[in-house]
Amino acid sequence: MAAGPDLSKRTPSAAGPDLAKRDPPDAAQAEAGMQAKAAAKPRLRGGRIGRWTPAWFVAPAVAALLAIGIFPLLFALVNSFRSYNLTRTRGGHPFIWFDNYADVLTDSSFQDAMIRTIGFLVTVLPIQVLLGMGIALLLHKPGVGFLKTLTRLSLVVPMATTYAVVGLIGRLLFNRDAGIVNYMAAQLGFGPIEWLGDADMAYVAVALMDIWQWTPFCALVFLAGLTMVPNEVEEAARLETKNWTSILRHVQLPYLLPGLTAILILRTADILKLFDMIFTMTRGGPGAATELVSVYIQRIGFRVFDQGAASAQAILLLVLTIILSRLYIRVVYQEVQQ
């Protein structure tokens, strides 16, 4: 009987397709798509413009930062080490190094202005934080949505008002003869109050205007933090206890601490350099009752024309702001990390 054909030695015909070496259809299509994208991608000459394109977009912002922020800071730093009085130009402006700082630190007027500023800070800032948190908690409660929206919009109005306009509004409100505050006091049986003519009352008036302007900012920041609290966690906490202070401390406070840190840093920097509102409202008076450190620096630099001493005072104020900011981050924001 004849043996059958040996199938193991059979070879494919020359005309048959080589299935082992054929690319999968998906891989071929992907390669064709990549080649089409590469052909459609614009080519830049030498590749230089492509590498430097991000730098060209950032360059205007960097130039503005150098011109508005960095250069004045360096100029003030250099002037703080020089005898720079605009009324005495003969002999140039020689370097006297740390003599300006020694004179400033021993200046009783500067010390009084710094004490007033710190007192203003520790008086106004806690009130703004507490009132802002109270407003945020009220707006966070479920209720009429239209009133909430209207309240949020109204909170933006004081923040959008410039410092100088706030000072002018304060002068109108606390005017002795035609102010609305004295009119309301008269309706309650009180006599006219010298808001801007008495040292203590002028300080109170300035503090009230600052509280009116920046309490909404604290409220909006805290409200943004409250919206980050998970609804299911908050609802479970409300079912567990009806004590709102416990819910605030254990559930909501961890989400409020980052916003609180930002409020402390920003408001501290704003209060330490507060000038426009006080200058338009009281010009630092009566006497020196509302002369905060920024108003005092302006008087030394542009009335006494001692740019060296004014620059040294500004640098010391900047150092104080940085120290307080680092303290806020270490004390308040550290609790978020833990």
Image (cartoon, grey):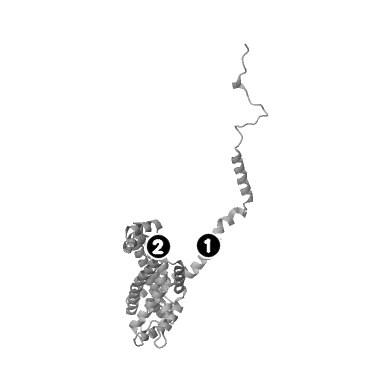
The alpha-carbon separation of the residues under discs 2 and 1 comes to: 35 Å
Q: Residues within 10 Å of mark 2 (few under 14, many from 20)?
A: many
**171 shown above or below 25:** below
* Amino acid under disc 1: Val
Q: For the point 35% across and 61% down, which residue is it?
A: 253
Residue farthest toward the right in the current orientation of the protein: 15
**176 shown above or below 103:** below
Instruction: State the image quarter where residue 126 is shown.
Output: bottom left
**257 shown above or below 86:** above
| Left or right: 107 in relation to 1 | left
Q: What element carries label 1?
A: helix
Near-viewer residue (186 or 122): 186
Image quarter in which the C terminus is found:
bottom left
Q: Residue 252: where, in percent of width, then height?
A: 36, 61
Residue designated by label 1: 58
Residue designated by label 2: 226
Instruction: State the image quarter where residue 18 is shown.
Output: top right
Q: Residue 293: where, in percent of width, then height?
A: 37, 76
Image quarter in which the N terminus is found:
top right
Q: Is mark 2 on a helix, strand or loop?
A: helix
* Amino acid under disc 2: Leu
Q: How crowded is mark 1: few (under 14 residues within 10 Å), some or many (20 or more)?
A: few
